[in-house]
Amino acid sequence: MATENVSGILGDLIEINNDRVAGFEKVIEDINDENVDLKAIFTEYAQQSRTNVQQLSAIAGTAAHLEEDKSVSGALHRVWIDIKSLFGGSDRASILSEAERGEDAIKKAYQDALADSGLPFQAQEIVRTQAQGINAAHDRIKALRDTAKA
């Protein structure tokens, strides 16, 4: 596989992790006191993505500016935050439903990256480990959402 394609795959993961950080930071700003527990969870997941970006950047050998880039698809991912603030979607179930939608996007990005058999072994291992963390975060947010809807 061409080095350019590997860098593209890793670059996409870097971008969506940056989008995830930005999304969670926006939600954290807007969360009411009654959902303060979500602030801690979302802060943890924003930090998870910052760590992912550092690891991916190290193996991709990407330019430093890539660590700040956000993807076009990520811009769409962040739109839900702005829509929710417009419609007053600050109830727990709404916040968690939208967070799960964002987690669906990053989970798919990792699945796509792992389906690409051209990643070098070291990159595959890091991406696979990060995907496990992303999947666990998704499942936790989904479980919280299901509880909030009940």
Image (cartoon, grey):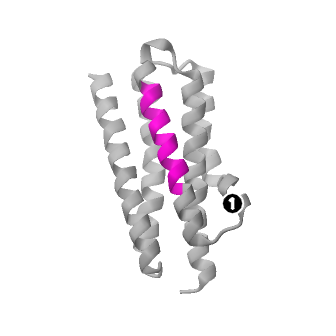
Instruction: Pinpoint residue 65: horizontal percent, then vertical percent.
Output: 73, 59
- Circle 1 residues within 10 Å: few <14, some 14–19, many ≥20: some
Task: Choose between 7 and 53: the one closer to the eye.
Answer: 53
Identify which residue is drawn at 51% across, 43% down. Answer: 47
Magenta range is 38-52
Disc count in the image? 1
Q: In screen coordinates, is 61 left or right of 135?
A: right
105 up-or-down from 118: above or below: above
129 up-or-down from 147: above or below: below
Identify which residue is drawn at 51% across, 49% down. Answer: 49
Instruction: Pinpoint residue 3: horizontal percent, then vertical percent.
Output: 60, 82
Amino acid at dot 1:
Leu
Instruction: Pinpoint residue 62: horizontal percent, then vertical percent.
Output: 66, 68
Q: Let me know if residue 98 appears in the view.
A: no
Identify which residue is drawn at 43% across, 13% down. Answer: 34
Q: Let me know if residue 42 appears in the view.
A: yes
Whether 44 is among the magenta residues is yes
Identify which residue is drawn at 61% across, 40% down. Answer: 22
- Residue, disc 1: 66
Task: Choose between 29 and 104: the one closer to the eye.
Answer: 29
State whether the magenta stretch is mostly helix, strand or loop.
helix
Instruction: Pinpoint residue 81: horizontal percent, then vertical percent.
Output: 58, 32
Task: Choose between 148 and 69: the one closer to the eye.
Answer: 69
Whether 13 is among the magenta residues is no
